[in-house]
Image (cartoon, rainbow, N blue to C red):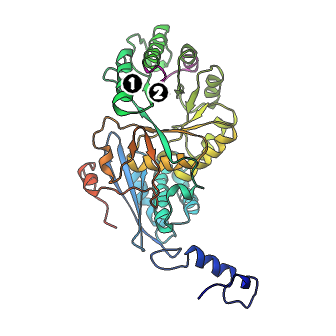
Amino acid sequence: MGIDYADLHDPNAEYTMRELSSETMGVRAKRGGGRDVEITDVQTTMVDGNFPWTLVRVYTDAGIVGTGEAYWGAGVPEIIARMTPFVVGENPLDIDRLFEHLVQKMSGEGSIGGTVITAISGIEIALHDLAGKILELPAYQLLGGKYRDSVRVYCDCHAGEEEDPQANADEAERVVEELGYDALKFDLDVPSGHEKDKANRHLRNEEIDHKAEIVRAVTERLDGRADAAFDCHWAFTGGSAKRIARAIEDFDVWWLEDPVPPENHDVQREVTRGTTTPIAAGENVYRKHGYRRLLEEQAVDVVAPDLPKMGGMRETRKVADMADSYYVPVAMHNVASPIGTMASAHVGAAIPNSLAVEYHSYQLGWWADLVEESVIQEGAIEIPEQPGLGLTLDMDAVAEHMVDGEELFDEA
């Protein structure tokens, strides 16, 4: 029977506005779709990649399953198991409410950061995959739609002899020419042969010169063919970080990442303000609250959240919105399997200020085998239009590469 739109304001009409909305949007409650779905279980399996990836699956009574990933860390699967009773029986479409619910339930165990938030992140990503499948929408649509059809990927590179500037330059050229990436990152917290006392984080002049030589060798070899960032892994004092940043100002540096430890925002701010070299940070910060001072005090030029660690997809979106208020771009740190990587890509598609998503497994030959679909092609991720994350786990590959003692997920 058709709907007479003239009857919408007639209280005696057969259809009300609410019924019309349900009819046209296809969200009438029904088992196997719509809102009448409940979570029945959450399971994890750890895969032994270049990091121990914690894959997370959320099961429902509709037979629909969502897959996510939590950043590696001891105890994360056990925390997820402890949280499972808190979400069983809940509606998986209520992603924000369930996130806050888990934060509150786990507050006694430290849900402002660390492995608790990482565990919640894995569930949150799986909920996005699950909600997208229920609503038949790609995950980026749940975040407000997309700005771009593909997301740039930067390749975290490792030369065989990382202390040798020319070895780094050779690897940069190989990755660009043979693998097709136009964005790279190299480590600077590598031995120089001039160290006297590593514990004090202070760098002697010879060590500064060595770091600058690595940057010079890589950027000159690339000669504009690719962007190059350099990672310090929080290894240096504030004074040494300033000296490194100033020593490389004349080179074509995309950003200098985490030059000082993450705890003291005041030092981070002064390093950033003391150089024209772009400074990136954020990998070891949790939830939107952790990024507030970094952004309000303009202590970073590039913010680098790790999505499967810091709170998940919506929390990363909130950080990106905050960063956009200060005209700061987002380059997502990522050491994940294809699942976490694609979750980052969906967020990267949905925010205006995305620079790139990291890829940390180019030397691991079977990374792409974990899913049935292609993920990275020619240095970019094409955003899938399939529901949820748009990926299907290859259970045989997962089983082959599981951490010893792990059990495979149940089938859907």
Q: Residue at x 47, y 10 (%)?
A: 209
Query: Could you say which quadrant of the image residue 43 lies in?
Result: bottom left
**Mark whose residue sits in front, 2 or 1:** 2
Q: Say which mark, if any, is on residue 89.
A: none
Residue 148 drawn at (x, y percent): 55, 47
Q: Please tell me how crowded label 2 is: few (under 14), some (14-19), or many (20+) other residues with Cα within 10 Å.
A: many
Quadrant location, the N terminus: bottom right
Residue bearing mark 1:
172
Q: Which amino acid does label 1 sit on?
A: Ala
Q: What stretch is highlighted in magenta?
A: 222-243
Can residue 275 be seen in the rendering of this structure? yes
Measure the C-alpha gap from mark 2 to mark 1: 9 Å
Residue bearing mark 2:
226
Residue 276 drawn at (x, y percent): 62, 20
State if disc 1 and disc 2 touch (CB < 8 Å).
Answer: yes
Residue 65 drawn at (x, y percent): 40, 65
Viewer-proximal residue among 48 and 412: 412
Residue 160 drawn at (x, y percent): 30, 23
Q: Is residue 104 magenta?
A: no
Q: What residue type is labelled 2?
A: Ala
Viewer-proximal residue among 55 and 169: 169
Q: Please tell me how crowded label 1 is: few (under 14), some (14-19), or many (20+) other residues with Cα within 10 Å.
A: many
Q: Does the magenta stretch include residue 231?
A: yes
Q: Residue at x 34, y 18 (%)?
A: 167
Q: Is residue 295 above or below residue 194?
A: below
- Outermost bottom residue: 12
Q: Is residue 175 left or right of residue 139?
A: left
